[in-house]
Amino acid sequence: MPKPRILVARALFPAVLERLAQHFEVEANVHDDIWSPAEFAAHLRDKDGVLTTGSERIDAALLAACPRLRIVANMAVGYNNFDLSAMDAAGVQGTNAPGVLTETTADFGFALLLATARRVTEGERYLRAGQWRRWSYDLLAGAEVHGSTLGIIGMGRIGQAIARRGAHGFGMRVIYHNRSHLAPEVEAACKANYVGKEELLRTADHVVLVLPYSPESHHTIGAPELALMKPTATLVNIARGGIVDDAALAEALRTRRIAAAGLDVFEGEPQVHPGLLEVPNVVLTPHIASATLPTRLAMAQLAADNLIAFFAGRGPLTPVNQ
Ligand code: DGY
């Protein structure tokens, strides 16, 4: 039996490529070339499976060009790069990489919250620019984190891990909004209380977004929502670009409608809305919330596990459709 043919769409750990090569005939984008959709389709045309990173769009046009394709294994928990109905129609399995990045991503959410509230990057820019002359009582004064109210929108695994950090580590009052209420024992472990979205936006000192992107969550935070927030509030987005209307946020930051924002994800990334690059009160990072080598390795291994299990006929470990 010939080995199934696999495409690895982006550069990846050599150890994972070696493991995949034991099971498959592998073509890997070892130089991490940026492929256009047409180039991606050309590489994928003769493949049975693909390991993607979340940047590659899997839609009806691609699937029509790649009739052999049977599985797409994303090494990301988010899978908004999948058109699930097109994949279902084409009989293509999708998988994601949940669980293995939860704590690492929550750590980063908190890093961004702290950096934003306490103006860490603004302070560093100020110092490096040689502007620091003397201590003064209100120099780069930020917002309290300990004892403040943390509002989390999207209370899956990562939201819950952020809630635990806030409640147990920083003595924060935690409120959350989610599609559904958590079970009472989960709420108790996170010390989190469910509230409506409007109440969360009006009450929270720090709002953290951790919900999946979908057409329903597009622009969950836009001008009307920003208008509800406290002028002293901070907003952190580690979920997906598109959940926030970046143009409206840039304007809210420019006019100090809210105090500050911390953003790891952007609409149309790696492009960043120019208005966000112009304002000082935003911390900007390049989609690195899950970026530690142990976690990225675990994500890649889970994607590989999914491919191996699928082609061995055992069924994928973490399917998202079918
Ligand atoms: C995820 O896992 O969805 C992350 O955003 C990928 O880096």
Image (tube, rainbow, N blue to C red):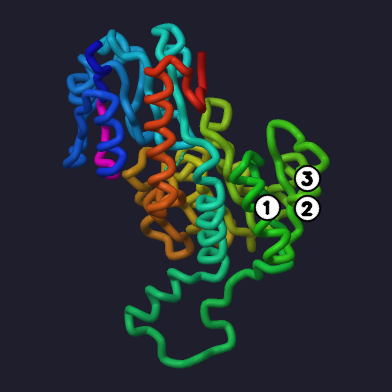
Q: Residue furthest right?
A: 184
Q: Is residue 12 above or below residue 205?
A: above
- The disc label shown at residue 187, or none: 3
Name the quadrant containing residue 225.
Answer: top right
Q: Disc 3, disc 1: CB below 8 Å? A: no
Most common SS among magenta residues: loop
Tell me the quarter of the picture where residue 146 sits. Answer: bottom right
Q: Position of residue 193 (x, y in %)?
A: 79, 47
Q: Residue at x 52, y 77 (%)?
A: 140
Pick whichever, 189 or 257, lies toward us: 189
Which amino acid does the dot numbered 3 rest on?
A: Glu
Instruction: Determine whether label 2 and label 3 are within 8 Å by CB.
Output: yes
| Contact flag, marks 2 and 1 (Cβ < 8 Å) | yes
Q: Is residue 182 left or right of residue 286?
A: right
Q: Disc 1 marks which amino acid? A: Ala
Q: Which mark is residue 163?
A: 1
Label 2 belongs to which residue? 191
Picture coordinates of residue 144, whole percent (x, y):
66, 70
